[in-house]
């Protein structure tokens, strides 16, 4: 039993999420509830909402693509109920009832209604005292396809599916969002009495509302005002609309915290983006996984940044691809740089165009400005790596590390064949292929002598 701030004690909550449908209208091999929204399955968003409501018991009704759905959430503590044949939303809820404590209040949510806010569902629960029933509704500009809420004298009397509705009922703009709450024991009874004598031959959860009214139980139709929040995703068009709606919600929250966007409609956040003060984000930046941007960071156009921490004051110029990396403060990356997993840059580091860095640590103030591959390398502070340098880290079977000491200067077009160590303050002449360690403080070169061939002539085209 949970006790609210005021009033009588409230029942514990069991949330049942319906996710067994195939989603025929998606025309996809991927089960509907696994279709990605902001980079995560639709169902993941619904589960997050259920957790935020504080439900101790969350049960997923699965069926279509069953193993794939369970597999996608195997690291979460969830109850699973299998619905072998999809005979309708009421039939689906019934599959979850055997494991649901009879004294609990059930809240049914749909796996294809992913934008719902926890506060909205809490409002619905709070509207229902004792044994009352609640359904979340909204006035839709275009209610087509949704179940309609029928009221008499303001009281909800039933919910009618689009396909079963009369022309007059089809004109009702108040729709059933699917989010429904009822005491478990009574819900169980009503579900057992459902009939499938409707146009779709299905057992509708929505029929429970009319049954409750017949039993003299009050049904609260709690109206929310945010149409986007309750939109059901049935096809790719709605999926795309939901994506835009969620993106604008995420970007809106960041703007409230002070983040500047060149165009709030041209940025994508697929995961969690944490920003410090005075962060600027230009168009077509895509953030995936967990990304953090420090104070004053600046992300220019066309960047993909995934699971990365960007330090304060660091600028990511246009067209970079950055993954599982970390930069310190005041670095400059790009344009056209690629930071692969394990790129760890300290402060004031510069990574320029067409430079790839993987599993490497680069200390303070070092510069790798042009056309270079740095892999499995430790670079000290104040190092300058010339254009076209390659750390040859792979012999076809194993990987080896390169170590470059502080203030070393690597000339252009150098190959460092790992394992190899370049001492501090060493200079490596341009064009060298370095296979042995180079001592600190000295110039090391590896080149054949330059020769000039006297009397040599360029070949000429033969007459035809
Ligand atoms: C349903 C509601 C409708 C409401 C709309 C809101 C019913 C009968 N209709 O219609 O009133 O306006 O949602 O979006 O409830 N599912 C199962 N097993 C089944 C059938 C469905 O798990 O046998 C799941 C689906 O995977 C989906 C959810 O239930 O997550 C809703 O099913 P869907 O077929 O999308 O119902 P709608 O036609 O959208
Ligand atoms: Mg639906």
Image (spheres, rainbow, N blue to C red):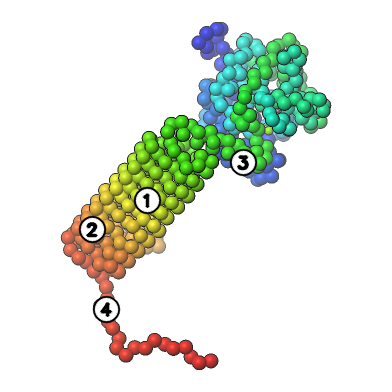
Q: Quadrant of residue 225?
A: top right
Residue indicated by mark 2: 408
Of circles 1 and 4, which is in front?
A: 1
| Residue 240: numbered disc | 3
Mark 1 lies on residue? 333
Quadrant containing the N terminus in the rendered view = top right
Q: Secondary structure at mark 2?
A: loop
Mark 3 is surrounded, within 10 Å at the Cα level, by few (under 14), some (14 to 19) or many (20 or more) other residues, namely: few
Q: Is residue 129 among the parts visible in the rendering?
A: yes
Q: Earlier in the sequence, mark 2 or mark 3?
A: 3
Which numbered disc, 1 or 2, marks the residue closer to the eye? 1
Horizontally, residue 294 falls left or right of residue 214, namely left
Separation of residues labelled 3 and 1 (CA atoms): 32 Å
* Mark 1 lies within 8 Å of ligand 1 (Cβ measured): no
| Chain-order first, disc 1 or disc 2 | 1
Q: Which residue is mark 4?
A: 450
Marks 1 and 2, how far apart at CA: 21 Å
């Amino acid at each position: 039993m949970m006790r609210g701030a005021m009033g009588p004690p409230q029942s514990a909550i069991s949330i049942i999420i319906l996710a067994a449908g195939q989603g025929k209208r998606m025309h996809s091999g991927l089960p509907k509830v696994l279709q990605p929204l902001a980079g995560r399955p639709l169902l993941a968003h619904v589960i997050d909402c259920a957790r935020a409501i504080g439900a101790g018991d969350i049960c997923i009704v699965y069926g279509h693509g069953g193993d794939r759905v369970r597999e996608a959430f195997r690291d979460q503590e969830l109850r699973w109920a299998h619905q072998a044949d999809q005979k309708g939303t009421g039939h689906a809820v019934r599959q979850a009832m055997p494991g649901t404590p009879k004294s609990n209040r059930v809240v049914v949510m749909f796996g294809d209604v992913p934008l719902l806010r926890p506060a909205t569902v809490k409002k619905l629960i709070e509207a229902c005292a004792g044994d009352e029933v609640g359904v979340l509704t909204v006035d839709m500009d275009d209610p087509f396809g949704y179940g309609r809420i029928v009221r008499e004298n303001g009281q909800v009397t039933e919910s009618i599916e689009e396909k079963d509705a009369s022309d007059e009922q089809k004109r009702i703009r108040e729709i059933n969002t699917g989010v429904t709450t009822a005491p478990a024991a009574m819900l169980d009874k009503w579900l057992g009495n459902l009939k499938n004598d409707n146009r779709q031959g299905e057992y509708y959860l929505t029929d429970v509302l009319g049954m409750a009214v017949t039993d003299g139980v009050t049904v609260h139709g709690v109206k929310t005002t945010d149409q986007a929040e309750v939109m059901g995703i049935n096809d790719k068009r709605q999926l795309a609309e939901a994506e835009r709606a969620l993106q604008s919600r995420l970007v809106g929250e960041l703007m409230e915290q002070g983040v500047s966007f060149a165009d709030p409609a041209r940025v994508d956040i697929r995961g969690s983006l944490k920003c410090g003060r005075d962060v600027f984000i230009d168009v077509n930046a895509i953030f995936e996984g967990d990304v953090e941007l420090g104070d004053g960071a600046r992300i220019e156009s066309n960047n993909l940044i995934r699971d990365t921490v960007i330090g304060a004051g660091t600028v990511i110029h246009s067209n970079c691809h950055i993954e599982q990396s970390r930069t310190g403060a005041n670095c400059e990356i790009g344009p056209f740089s690629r930071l692969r997993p394990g790129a760890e840059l300290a402060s004031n580091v510069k990574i320029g165009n067409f430079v790839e860095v993987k599993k490497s640590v680069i200390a303070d103030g070092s510069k790798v400005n042009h056309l270079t591959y740095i892999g499995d390398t430790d670079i000290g502070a104040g190092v300058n790596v010339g254009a076209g340098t390659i750390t040859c880290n792979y012999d076809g079977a194993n990987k080896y590390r390169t170590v470059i000491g502080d203030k070393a200067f690597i000339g252009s077009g150098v190959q460092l064949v790992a394992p190899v160590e370049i001492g501090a303050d060493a200079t490596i002449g341009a064009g060298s292929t370095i296979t042995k360690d180079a001592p600190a403080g000295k110039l090391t070169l590896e080149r054949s002598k330059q020769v000039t061939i006297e009397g040599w002539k360029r070949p000429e085209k033969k007459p035809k």
